[in-house]
Image: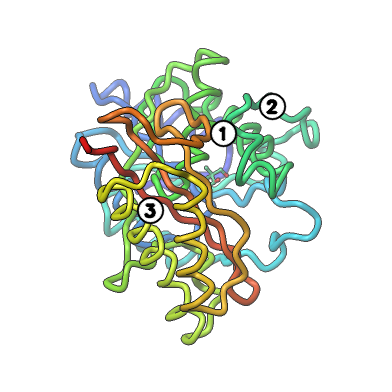
Amino acid sequence: MEIVSSVKDFQFLLSEGRNSGKEIGFVPTMGALHEGHTSLIDTSVKQKKSTAVSIFINPLQFSAEEDLDNYPSSLEKDEEICINHKVDILFCPTQKEIYPNGPPEPEEIGEIGTILEGKSRPSHFPGVATVVARLFEIVGKSCAYFGEKDFQQVKVVNDLVKRRQFPVEIVACPTIRQVDGLALSSRNAYLTQDQLTDASVLYRALTVGAESILNGEKNSENLKKLISDVVKSESKGDLDYVGIVDSETFTPLNLLNDLGEQVRILIACKFGNARLIDNIGVVVPET
Ligand code: PAF
């Protein structure tokens, strides 16, 4: 595995990969790699791509009150993980490499980025879209792998690719969970053992919501109350939102009507200092 920090060296290695006849598989990350990330890497490697991982903690996607300064970082361990998972190129740029002229104008985000996570963290998706656009400009034609744990981020990135016409195919990979259902996230590192146990309520609550849809519940408000009640009664979590949207369009749904409609339930909740998000997909059944 080659480790580079300059855009020039990175692009040289990408072109070597292409010259060897392989397509590029790109996994953008902020480091503190866990099995969620390695599942993205493994998918790229299995698809026989020349696999490049970037590690860049992007300041633009954190607001002033958020955890930029304490965001977990473990570069040596990350390098070892990348080697073990057969990554070809690890790109660890400085801020100057990514934003040579200082922070750029934030990238435009569509409506999808303004609700739920976008409403609670207004500068987050513009920051994500800005760095992802910059990374896609650097990497060029490729498949880029993102985790469905950040379902709304996947939608924002898909939207960005369409709007800016990047030659990038977005591959959304399933969320990886602990045995108790907690979705793997770098932010889980902030939690105490008790908080980790508490946070497993998120997946239980989402599952209760999904089962209720499968049993015929069609009213979003009822579903949101049901899910919120599970979180409130079974944990000390500070719930931010429960959202129910059409999986394809990300339009909020009041009533689930159509048989076969793909629905996503999304949740955000704080446990101690960590704000966690999760989601689940359900298909509306025949009633
Ligand atoms: O999901 C993440 O880790 C980040 O939001 C991303 C896509 C690497 C952009 O900084």
- Left or right of 113 on screen, residue 4: left
- Ligand 1 within 8 Å of the CB at mark 1: yes
Give the x, y percent position of residue 223: 44, 52
Up/down of 143 relative to 181, above or below: above
Marks 3 and 2 in Cβ contact (< 8 Å): no
Marks 1 and 3 in Cβ contact (< 8 Å): no
The residue positioned 37% from the left and 38% from the top of the image is 263
Q: Secondary structure at mark 1?
A: helix
In this view, the residue farthest toward the bottom is 194
In the image, what residue type sits under mark 1? Val
**From mark 1 to mark 3, how far is it between C-alphas?**
16 Å
Give the x, y percent position of residue 154: 46, 36
User: In this view of the protein, which residue sits in the foreground, 2 or 160?
Assistant: 160
Give the x, y percent position of residue 124: 67, 44
Q: Which residue is mark 3?
A: 37
Marks 2 and 1 in Cβ contact (< 8 Å): yes
In the image, what residue type sits under mark 2? Glu
**From mark 3 to mark 2, how far is it between C-alphas?**
25 Å
Toward which corner of the image does residue 13 lie, by quadrant? top left
Query: Dot 3: few (<14), some (14–19), or many (≥20) neighbours within 10 Å?
Result: many
**From mark 2 to mark 1, how far is it between C-alphas?**
9 Å
Q: Which mark is residue 107?
A: 2
The residue positioned 33% from the left and 39% from the top of the image is 51
Query: Dot 2: few (<14), some (14–19), or many (≥20) neighbours within 10 Å?
Result: some
In the image, what residue type sits under mark 3? His
User: In this view of the protein, which residue sits in the foreground, 57 or 116?
Assistant: 116
- Left or right of 28 on screen, residue 80: left
Up/down of 165 relative to 236, above or below: above
Give the x, y percent position of residue 196: 46, 78
The residue positioned 63% from the left and 59% from the top of the image is 240
Ligand 1 located in image quadrant? top right
Please report whichever mark, 2 or 1, sits nearer to the chain's N-terminal start. 2
